[in-house]
Image (cartoon, rainbow, N blue to C red):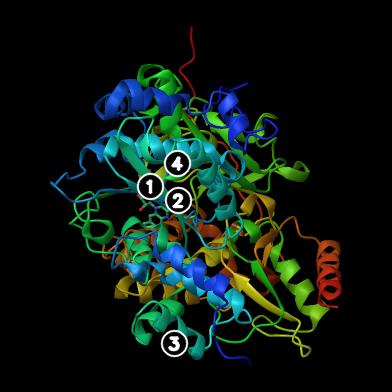
Amino acid sequence: MGRKLLLEKAHIEGIRYYDTYRSNGGYAAAEKALKSMGPEGVLEEVKKSGLRGRGGAGFPTGMKWSFIAKPEGVPRYLVCNADESEPGTFKDRYLMEFIPHLLIEGLLISSFTLGANAAYIYIRGEYAWIPDILEQAIAEAKNKGWLGKNILGTGFDLEIYVQRGAGAYICGEETALLESLEGKRGNPRIKPPFPAVKGLWGCPTVVNNVETLAAVVPIVNIGGDEYIKYGIGKSTGTKLISACGNINKPGVYEIEMNISVEEFIYSDEYCGGIKNGKRLKACIPGGSSVPVLPANLLLKTAKGETRMMTYESLNDGGFATGSMLGSGGFIVMDEDQCIVRNTLTFARFYHHESCGQCSPCREGTGWMKKVLHNIEYGKGKMSDIDLLWDIQRKIEGNTICPLGDAAAWPVAAAIRHFRDEFEWHVKNPDEALTRNFGLAHYADPIPVPEPAATV
Amino acid sequence: MAAIQFSEEKLNKVKEIVARYPEGKQKSALIPVLHLAQEEFDGWLSSDTMDYVASLLQLKPIEVYEVATFYSMFNLKPVGKFLFEVCQTGPCMVSGSDQIIDYIKNKLGIGVGETTPDGMFTLKTVECLGACGYAPMMQLGKHFREHLTPARVDEIIAECRAKAN
Ligand SMILES: Cc1cc2nc3c(=O)[nH]c(=O)nc-3n(C[C@H](O)[C@H](O)[C@H](O)COP(=O)(O)O)c2cc1C
Ligand code: SF4
Ligand code: FES
């Protein structure tokens, strides 16, 4: 069994409530941080832990925190990104629903470290029942003296508020989130200035993902040096993976970042293998924005090494033959799935979610959707495949925020690895309406040169 | 329809929301207050409702329209008493959401974006709601209905009908 740091106690009856959380060791980290470590001490441990942002980009959290500007007399804010809208991702929801005090404790320690006296949890509007759970946890914590004025007699004050979004993936992007929190449309801001300098209402702000903030609690408890022992290299600690698609056991799993992709998919501890005894065709390992990989490149890298569930290993081979850990949204597709159709749903998603500020993103996502629609519904031309490639190239890198790239990458990867499936759709428009291309050779092992015979 | 006016209780809620932000930043309350208004006034935001929210928060009406039109959860047209918002994005699609959407269409005799003639049900397709592991799924009011099958859909429809009576 893998060791856990976040969800270890998530199954304890009543852990959602303060008393149970507290009697199971909850708020011990907050006490340690506020009473004995001080802000510098916490920052030091977070840096040592190698914790990387769990929202998708994987930026080192300690470094991000050290960038926050501290002008005299200007308030600082901590904003918790609970927008969780990347298709395939549903881990933050699990954490907030089942062990909300872990997030509140993480917010308390992090706000204390940053010197923020107000923290906002920005949660996607569709998670409409979760604010009640969070607000109850906040009220309990406040009642017990963990929030409010002069916490634990340290002179530190903190209020935590929950703000609901209203249905916009783009508000997960940190500057769009801040705009939304200010009561505006979610249009991303041009950076710089970065939020650490000019964020919420023009004040220095740190934006962190739910899971990142929760991970601060075990880091304070066990120390940064111990935390890095859970994982490999720069992929330290544990990661929540939300697994979905054609697997036996979809759900949220906490993994140590030292297991292989194969173990994650096939072992009974995690996904439990492919549903209905089917074969694995493809997988999108880190949320809809990251490149899709065919089975043969998923389990082993192009060099023939075992692919691991780490930031580095999933990225091995770059975009040519690798992918990304991203948000941990792990989407598995079996032999019956159609790559063209799946890519079409993503293109539609990004077109729907584009805020419309940049023409390459606004127009390009619409074209990609139309062209993919034609190919899927038997009206495609061979030249459409190159057209798609061309459009995605023209979006990538030419936009204000990374949503443009996020829209381009899935299309690029689908064509790169599954071009024959697109061509089959074009050549067999009628057949493509009634059946899928199937597994083809995507699950074949990559040919590895025979080792020289030993004499 | 009755005049657009929050109850005393809801007005207190608005005050509580505004108090979460620093002095003068009450515009931040806009999205939470629009949610309140939509819940209170028949599940959608008419221009009268939006103007009312603008006056409550001392904003220009255009500031409210700009926001209401940006976010997909705000309905700018009347909807049925029960709004079925079925997810159709990749992970749900590979788990059979297309079949569920077709089933609901046939069962209710409406297309996507339409409301049944009795004003009971509206069908909408939406993009990933963060329940991909429990697919196919839909949002119904405040909650998610997950692991949908035709039989589950039948139950949900019956449950709504019973609630309406
Ligand atoms: C289009 C887009 C959507 C995003 N959605 C989310 C999200 O839902 N949740 C999240 O934590 N980060 C999301 N991010 C990343 C945030 O911009 C930001 O990097 C993150 O919240 C930082 O927190 P972390 O360092 O703790 O990961 C998104 C980024 C982009 C470009
Ligand atoms: S890339 Fe797309 S979502 Fe991002 S700012 Fe430009 S138009 Fe908006
Ligand atoms: S794809 Fe339907 S909930 Fe995520």
Residue placed under numbered mark 1 in the picture: A319
Tell me: residue A83, above or below residue A270: below
Q: Determine whether label 2 and label 1 are within 8 Å by CB.
A: yes
Q: Nearer the viewer, residue A80 or B59?
A: B59
Q: How many numbered marks, from 0 up?
A: 4
x, y percent for residue A179: 33, 65
x, y percent for residue A308: 49, 30
In the picture as drawn, the residue positioned furthest to the left comes out as: A72
Q: Nearer the viewer, residue A230 or A78?
A: A78
Q: What amino acid is labelled 1 in the image?
A: Phe
Mark number displayed over residue A291: 2
Tell me: residue A102, above or below residue B80: above
Q: CA distance from mark 3 to mark 4?
A: 45 Å
Residue A49 shows up from this direction: no
Instruction: Kindly identify which chain the residue marked by label 1 belongs to.
Output: A
Q: Nearer the viewer, mark 4 or mark 2?
A: 4
- Ranked by sequence position, the earlier of labels 1 and 4 is 1
Instruction: Kindly identify which chain the residue marked by label 4 belongs to.
Output: A
> Which secondary structure lies at badge 2?
loop
Q: Nearer the viewer, mark 1 or mark 3?
A: 3
Instruction: Kindly identify which chain the residue marked by label 2 belongs to.
Output: A
Q: CA distance from mark 1 to mark 3?
A: 49 Å
Residue B27 shows up from this direction: yes
Q: What amino acid is labelled 3 in the image?
A: Asp
Residue placed under numbered mark 4 in the picture: A325
Q: What amino acid is labelled 4 in the image?
A: Leu
Q: Determine whether label 1 and label 3 are within 8 Å by CB.
A: no
x, y percent for residue A44: 27, 25
Q: Nearer the viewer, mark 1 or mark 4?
A: 4
- Ranked by sequence position, the earlier of labels 4 and 2 is 2
Please state if A126 lies on the left or on the right of B85 as rendered. Answer: left
Q: Are marks 1 and 3 on the same chain?
A: no
